[in-house]
């Protein structure tokens, strides 16, 4: 780390004792733990234009949520932009992702309890009263389709033009919008002391279609009837149809 960046970081968190690259790295950014005299912080750094855009969005979301503790997310501390990279500083949270917790769970009972907790956490988010600062402009799905087209043109999407055209022509009927996570997979929730307690990677958190969250949440477990049932013991407000699931998880998500 160069001296100028370290100086800017210390202006936010205080004197840095150590900076350690974490063993588990994300696909969109590098992640380091910063330790100071009293606290630990997380430093996320992104380099590609698409991922820098996402990191800036995450910083904006976390900053908005500092005074909204009813939504459990890491605490925002600062955001730094350089010519070729961007950095987000937030609290370091103990725990592990739900993905890791499910792998480590010794019994089916433990796995089902985790999935039920996942459903409960997501339902609580979707039932949270709208945060004033989430002033989403226009229709969420229409905006996502516009982004999808841009990412496709940039060559940074797994989906193709045929799929995008199908998504544009087969949009599901609208439902009431809620606060959504925007990338609600098992990788993006934290398990602390055996309970699913916190959302991470919240760049997409906004007012949007809750079926997108729900579809992504169950997508990795779609062939495991027991885990899906446990999720819906916690998430009781709505069950996505097969068609809705296909549209969101196997369709729209291909561009993000």
Image: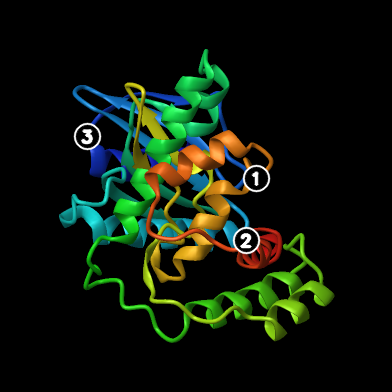
Q: Earlier in the sequence, mark 1 or mark 3?
A: 3
**Are the residues tagged 1 and 2 within 8 Å (C-beta)?**
yes
Q: Given this view, does label 2 or label 3 mark the residue nearer the observer? A: 2
Which mark, residue 245? 2
Query: Where's residue 90, x and y in %?
Result: 32, 42
Q: Earlier in the sequence, mark 1 or mark 2?
A: 1
Which mark, residue 123? none
Mark 2 vs mark 3, CA separation in Å: 46 Å
Please give left or right for residue 78 compared with residue 14 in the image: right
Mark 1 vs mark 3, CA separation in Å: 46 Å
Residue indicated by mark 1: 222
Above or below, 47 relative to 134? above
Residue 153 seen in the current view: yes
Residue located farthest toward the top when viewing the structure as drawn: 106
Residue indicated by mark 3: 14
At a point 53% along the width and 21% down the height, the residue shown is 108
């Amino acid at each position: 780390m160069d001296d100028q960046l370290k100086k800017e970081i210390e202006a936010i968190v205080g004197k840095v004792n150590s900076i350690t690259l974490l063993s588990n790295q994300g696909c969109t950014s590098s992640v380091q733990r910063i330790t100071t005299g009293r606290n630990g912080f997380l430093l996320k750094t992104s380099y590609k234009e698409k991922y820098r855009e996402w990191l800036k969005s995450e910083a904006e979301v976390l900053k908005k949520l500092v005074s909204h503790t009813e939504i459990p997310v890491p605490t925002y501390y600062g955001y730094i932009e350089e010519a070729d990279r961007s950095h987000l500083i937030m609290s370091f949270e103990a725990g592990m992702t739900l993905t890791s917790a499910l792998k480590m769970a010794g019994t089916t009972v433990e796995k089902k309890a985790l999935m039920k907790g996942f459903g409960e956490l997501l339902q609580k988010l979707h039932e949270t009263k709208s945060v004033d600062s989430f002033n989403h402009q226009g229709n969420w799905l229409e905006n996502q389709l516009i982004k999808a087209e841009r990412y496709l043109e940039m060559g940074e999407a797994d989906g193709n033009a045929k799929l995008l055209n199908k998504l544009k022509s087969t949009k599901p009927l609208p439902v009431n919008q809620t606060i959504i996570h925007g990338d609600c997979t098992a990788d993006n929730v934290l398990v602390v002391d055996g309970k699913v307690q916190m959302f991470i990677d919240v760049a997409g958190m906004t007012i949007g279609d809750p079926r997108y969250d729900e579809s992504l949440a169950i997508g990795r477990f779609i062939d495991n009837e027991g885990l899906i049932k446990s999720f819906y013991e916690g998430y009781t407000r709505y069950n996505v149809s097969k068609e809705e699931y296909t549209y969101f998880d196997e369709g729209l998500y291909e561009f993000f």
